[in-house]
Image (cartoon, rainbow, N blue to C red):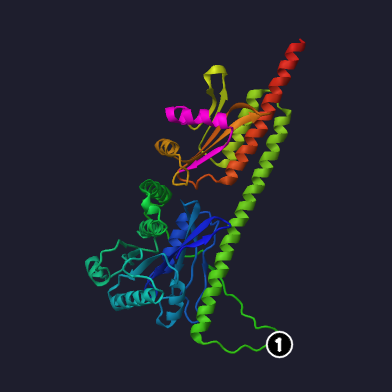
Amino acid sequence: MVQFDNRQWQAKLKIVYYGPAVGGKTTCLQAIHRATDPERRTKLYSLNTASDRTLFFDLMSLKLGRIRGYELLIQLYTVPGQVQYQATRKAVLAGADGVVFVADSQVDRARDNVESLRDLVANLRSHGMDPETIPLVYHYNKQDLDPLIQIEDLETMLNPRKRPAFPTVATRGNGVLEGFAEICQMTVMSVADRLGVAQNPKAVERLAEQLRRSLKPLLGGGGTEDVSGDIVVNRPPRKPEAGKEEAPLSAEALVDEAVQANVAMTDMSSTLDLLNRSLQRQLRRLSSLHELLRDLSMEKDPKNILKMAMKTAIQQLEVIGASLSLISGTEGLRPLLLHGFKKDPLLANPKGAERAARLMQELKPLMVQLGGDEEDPDLEALLMEAGFGSAIWIPLVAYGRPLGLLGAYAGSDRSPLEKEDLELSSILAASASIAYLNVRSRRKLEASKV
């Protein structure tokens, strides 16, 4: 079941990788983690079981856009395949929004696959979830080994309803990302349907396009690299209260408590990682803004002031396109500086030009994201046609006087521009506008004295 964080405006979707022991579930998550986070900015967590080296709990997060203003986060989990860890599998499966069943394709594992699938169905029903409707994808793993069960036989044995299925070699990543992309799309669209988004065809279309753009960079890479490693093992300590002796817990209660503790711990650690990266980013931005304000105070050329402001916006917003236009008499906005394109997508489009003129009248900044909650289909269509995922437009205003418009365009392969980007852009635009008008006024004053 989707978890909503109203403070961070995040919606967390849970996908569980299920299957028989030593079937490749953990290796699948390692392959996904390596592909989605090559710089290892986020950690992949695990907890070893007491009597087996197999990892039973993993988590990672991936951003996939927004639904109703909430940023979507995908959390991935695995469960232990060993028979003795039934309580653990049941606890981890609670609240799942989607499932990937990782079958072992070796001939001698046929019975294990069937029993694991039967176990999955029983555990889903015990949590009040319908095995027939929950998003489900199959991985037929270990396709590089012999002897193998034929794909057709695996389909008959495990997948009579013909859910999406992918032959995989998890140790090399082959097929894993394709299956991951499929379960992400199925899960997000299922959640959108439950939240009532499906009743709005345009919203569904935007969401589908947003998902395709987010997942496209992951596909088509093949895979030959060993993906093992990069696992952080966490063992939560258990301390009794001072002066009290605790009654021994049953094996099932102990496992359930350990699972719940680690879910909370890893979720908190993930949140702290995100917060730390956000703070580091804000620090870099403040330093850059300080340097810009210092340089603006010493600059004597009006055009250089605008160039510095636009360069800072491109670097700090991490955008691939930017424009800066000034009001020119009765001609309205005219492009002065362009980056990443030959024509400003906004002003080059008739409807976009009308929207720009309205922005200059309202003197309010505007941010548009594909798949966002904005009721501005013309601008969303404009962005989609130009190949951008989001954009910000900030009027340049000094002492209540409109001067021009600063636009920043983010690529579709990065996360959408957010409110903090809008705030930074507003500060940049205001600082540059005042400095620009001051320098122009000083020049006129100096010229009148000659």
| Residues drawn in magenta | 341-369
Q: Where does residue 1 sit, x and y in percent of width and height?
A: 45, 66
Q: Decide whether residue 385 is among the magenta residues.
A: no
Q: Where does residue 365 sit, x and y in percent of width and height?
A: 57, 37
User: Is 314 on the left or on the right of 450, as rendered?
Assistant: left
Residues 290 and 105: in front is 290
Q: In this view, does 60 lie above or below 372?
A: below
User: Is 367 on the left or on the right of 350, as rendered?
Assistant: right
Q: Is residue 64 above or below residue 396?
A: below
* Residue displayed at 37% across by 66% down: 100
Q: Can residue 245 be seen in this view?
A: yes
Question: Across the whole image, how many numbered discs are drawn on residues?
Answer: 1
Q: Where does residue 34 sit, x and y in percent of width and height?
A: 47, 58
Identity, as a three-letter code, of the amino acid under mark 1: Gly
The answer to which quarter of the image holds residue 109 is bottom left
Q: Decide whether residue 345 is among the magenta residues.
A: yes
Where does label 1 land, which residue?
243
Q: Where does residue 162 sit, x and y in percent of width and height?
A: 26, 64
The answer to which quarter of the image holds residue 202 is top left
